[in-house]
Image: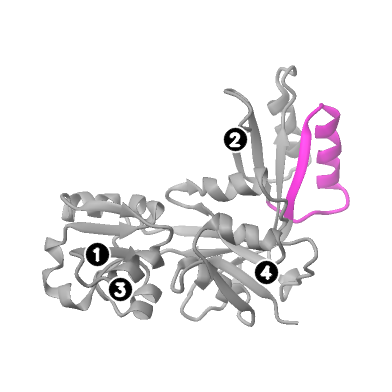
Amino acid sequence: MTKKVGYLGPEGTFTEAAAKAVMPDSDRYSYSTIPACMAATAEKDIDIAVVPLENAIEGSVNMTLDYLIHKHDLPIIGEITVPIEQHLMVHPAREKDWENISDLYSHPQAIAQCDEFINTKLPNVKVYYTNSTSSAAKDISEHPGINGAAIANYLAAEKYGLKIVKQNIHDYDNNHTRFVLLSNKDSKVSLEDKKQKNGKTTLMITLPSDYSGALHQVLSAFAWRKLNLTKIESRPMKTGIGNYFFIIDVDQEMDEVLIPGVIAEVEALGCGVRILGSYPCFLSHDIKEGKPVPK
């Protein structure tokens, strides 16, 4: 049965490219916000949500993390990392006069990723934040009277008939975004060639409030088992200042001995442990092709 996959839309976003790359034969549905996409999965309107989790330049997408932790219990079943190339695009009528634009539209993370270009080349523009880079491109396309430009990818420029006037305006070349696939618990999904991909396990750990040195002992539980951690991040529990939980990425999928041993040892310290997912990871070198390759 063809899976229903939701993504942060409209058409032409990096998220749609990620969804197409990892599940090319799915039926895809766009949502205007990350929470709306995740809620549709939780309510079983769709089988899988593809949402951004982390950018190499700007760090974690806090909205995704917060809704994953506090709002919805959606297991992570896969990850795809996509190279991000941000371009400045305008309505064709403004192609020759783009340096005189007064307004700039894009997603907050895209704006942040292009900070140096904006401050150097467009220091006087007024910035307007949108729900996605593609929605910014759509707005420029549908309102030719706006003296503005959008920051988005080539897919958005192609989709909405815009002219790219400056390519690759992001501040750093090694700009990638991790997207995760979130599944409702009734949906059985098997990604192709799972055994040929590297895997990852993501845990949420809360520390006991009255245990000095608990974080050190938690990390030691991974270290002596020689489990490599690719990420550890603290996030507020939203119960008061100073109350945090930790998101930890382990560089392998769940096994029968090592990770269960860590969980048992950490719980024995009085910590809370929640498995957010154990999943294969993909890397898309070329989102034009839409073909994931082993990471």
Ranked by sequence position, the earlier of labels 3 and 2 is 3
Q: Residue at x 73, y 56 (%)?
A: 75
The amino acid type of the residue labelled 1 equals: Ala
Q: CA distance from mark 3 to mark 1?
A: 12 Å
Q: CA distance from mark 4 to mark 2?
A: 30 Å
Q: CA distance from mark 1 to mark 4?
A: 33 Å
Ranked by sequence position, the earlier of labels 3 and 1 is 3
User: In the rendered image, which residue does mark 1 sit on?
Assistant: 149
Q: CA distance from mark 2 to mark 1?
A: 36 Å
Question: Closer to the camera: disc 4 or disc 2?
Answer: 4
- Residue 231 at x, y percent in the picture: 60, 44
User: In the rendered image, which residue does mark 2 sit on?
Assistant: 234
Corner quadrant of residue 78: bottom right
Q: Residue at x 22, y 72 (%)?
A: 144
The amino acid type of the residue labelled 4 equals: Ile
| Side of 35 relative to 125 (left or right) | right
Query: Tag on residue 46?
Result: 4
- Residue 43 at x, y percent in the picture: 70, 61
Secondary-structure class at tag 2: strand
Corner quadrant of residue 277: bottom right
Badge 3 crowding class, 10 Å Cα cut-off, few under 14, some 14 to 19, many 20 or more, is few
The range drawn in magenta is 251-277
User: In the rendered image, which residue does mark 3 sit on?
Assistant: 142
- Residue 207 at x, y percent in the picture: 72, 28
Question: Closer to the camera: disc 3 or disc 1?
Answer: 3
The amino acid type of the residue labelled 2 equals: Ser
Residue 272 versus residue 112 in the image, above or below: above
* In the foreground, 223 or 69: 69
Q: Are marks 2 and 1 in contact (CB under 8 Å)?
A: no
